[in-house]
């Protein structure tokens, strides 16, 4: 059996792309036909200014002007609208990354962010690099930034994305609806009683999981204030991530109510906590959404960032797996209404399970390693024109 060399490239823009890469690394390492796996953050191989452009700027804009991100997301969602500008920015900074790829000499490169995918696609298109490229989209919407001028395979979260991509002009036989890759541990059952005992939780009472994300970017403090005023017999687990200020603030707010609140910083127990929760209150990032679905956990959507998080929210709402709380002032009312409706809550849990793809990482690994396509699909200038015409026709229909 020939052993394959697999490279997985992500980018630390938020935490989702890195978590998807970690999940894929586990799935590939479990395969007997894989000899070596290298998973890396592509931004570690560019200069500080370039890293700030992608990672620091995204976080800052998420905090200060999320509406701008939404405007930019919609404005740039046209085929090839920004790719040449991005390549002008990315390629000069990417020489260390390119050297890393060439030194490792992978049979396959799997990208969970469009930045390294775009760089590698350009090299393949110009015949400067010989490898196979697979691109894993980590949200519930295929944005034009994920388009690459040369690739072997795409992996997307839902059937709608594949239909949209085919309508633009991408070949359907090179698109797999895999779901978003999450930790393969989500395929395994959880001892709910043991988790509840470890955290002092009563499974007979509603358990609200308030997730601030790895970076702690969420309205968690405002949510906690509203929950403190509720007379409902609930328990809340507040995850503050790496945001020390949020952790201190929530601890201060809940100091007199330790019976109902558990406050946690960064944790590796999200799978276990999702398994015991009744609802998750969170921003709908792609990985958080996929993990909640895999746990059969209904979501209360809070303050989605314009663009991809709004598209993730749309998917959850359309399929009956979430409710949205646009104003935190009505949170208590919405929670009370939902928790009092056992049938609706059960239906939401079932809808979440129906949408879930806990096996996504394994499906991607299997497909990549069984791929018989030796030549990449290259996008010509004529193809570009057809893509633009198809996108324009769809928007103006």
Image (tube, helix red, strand yellow):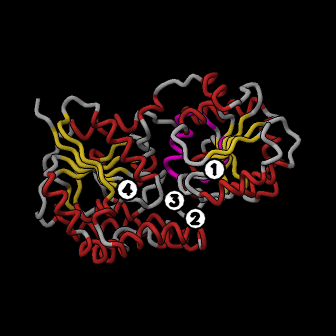
Residue matched to label 2? 306
124 relative position to 149: left or right: left
Frontmost of labels 2 and 4 is: 2
Q: Which segment is the magenta one?
A: 280-297
Q: Residue at x 45, y 31 (%)?
A: 185
Q: Is residue 292 magenta?
A: yes
Gap in angstroms between the C-alphas marked 3 and 1: 15 Å
Q: Mark 3 — residue?
A: 308
Q: Is residue 123 above or below residue 166?
A: below
Q: Residue, x 62% and y 36% (percent of image)?
A: 297
Q: Which residue is mark 4?
A: 167
Question: x and y percent of residue 66 in the render?
Answer: 59, 69
State which quadrant residue 269 falls in: top right
Which one is earlier in the sequence, the residue at label 2 or at label 4?
4
Q: Which residue is mark 1?
A: 282
Mark pair 4, 3: CA separation: 20 Å
Distance between mark 1 and mark 4 Cα atoms: 33 Å
How many residues crowd around disc 2 within 10 Å: few (fewer than 14), some, or many (20 or more)? some
Image quadrant in which you'd find residue 122: bottom left
Asked if the stretch drawn in magenta spans residue 176, the answer is no
- Contact (Cβ within 8 Å) of mark 3 with mark 1: no
Does label 1 or label 2 sit earlier along the sequence? 1
The answer to whether mark 1 and mark 4 are in CB contact below 8 A is: no
Distance in Å between CA atoms under marks 2 and 4: 25 Å
Q: Nearer the viewer, residue 217 or 153?
A: 217
């Amino acid at each position: 059996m020939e052993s394959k060399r697999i490279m997985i490239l992500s980018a630390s823009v938020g935490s989702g792309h890195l978590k998807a890469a970690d999940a894929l690394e586990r799935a590939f390492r479990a395969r007997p036909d894989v000899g070596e796996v290298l998973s890396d953050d592509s931004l570690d191989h560019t200069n500080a200014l370039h890293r700030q452009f992608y990672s620091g700027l995204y976080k800052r804009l998420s905090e200060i002007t999320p509406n701008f991100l939404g405007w930019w997301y919609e404005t740039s969602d046209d085929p090839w609208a920004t790719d040449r500008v991005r390549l002008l920015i990315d390629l000069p900074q990417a020489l260390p990354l390119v050297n890393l790829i060439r030194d490792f000499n992978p049979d396959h490169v799997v990208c969970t962010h469009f930045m390294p995918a775009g760089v590698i696609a350009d090299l393949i298109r110009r015949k400067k690099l010989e490898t196979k490229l697979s691109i894993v989209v980590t949200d519930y919407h295929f944005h034009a930034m994920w388009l690459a001028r040369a690739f072997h395979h795409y992996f997307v979260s839902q059937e709608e994305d594949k239909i949209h991509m085919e309508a633009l002009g991408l070949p359907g036989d090179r698109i797999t609806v895999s779901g978003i890759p999450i930790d393969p541990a989500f395929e395994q059952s959880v001892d709910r009683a043991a988790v509840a005992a470890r955290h002092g939780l009563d499974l007979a009472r509603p358990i609200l999981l308030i997730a601030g994300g790895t970076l702690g970017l969420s309205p968690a403090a405002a949510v906690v204030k509203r929950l403190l005023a509720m007379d409902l017999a609930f328990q809340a687990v507040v995850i503050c991530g790496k945001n020390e200020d949020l952790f201190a603030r929530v601890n201060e707010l809940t100091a007199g109510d330790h019976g109902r609140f558990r406050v946690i910083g960064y944790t590796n127990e999200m799978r276990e906590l999702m398994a015991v929760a009744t609802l998750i209150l969170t921003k709908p990032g792609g990985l958080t959404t996929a993990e909640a679905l895999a746990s059969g956990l209904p979501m209360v959507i809070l303050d989605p960032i314009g663009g991809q998080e709004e598209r993730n929210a749309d998917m959850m709402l359309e399929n009956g797996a979430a409710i949205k709380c646009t104003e935190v002032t009505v949170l208590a009312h919405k929670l009370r209404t939902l928790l009092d409706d056992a049938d609706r809550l059960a239906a939401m849990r079932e809808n979440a399970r129906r949408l879930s793809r806990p096996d996504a990482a394994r499906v991607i690994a299997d497909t990549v390693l069984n791929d018989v396509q030796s030549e990449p699909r290259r996008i010509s200038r004529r193809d570009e024109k057809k893509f633009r015409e198809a996108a324009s026709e769809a928007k103006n229909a």
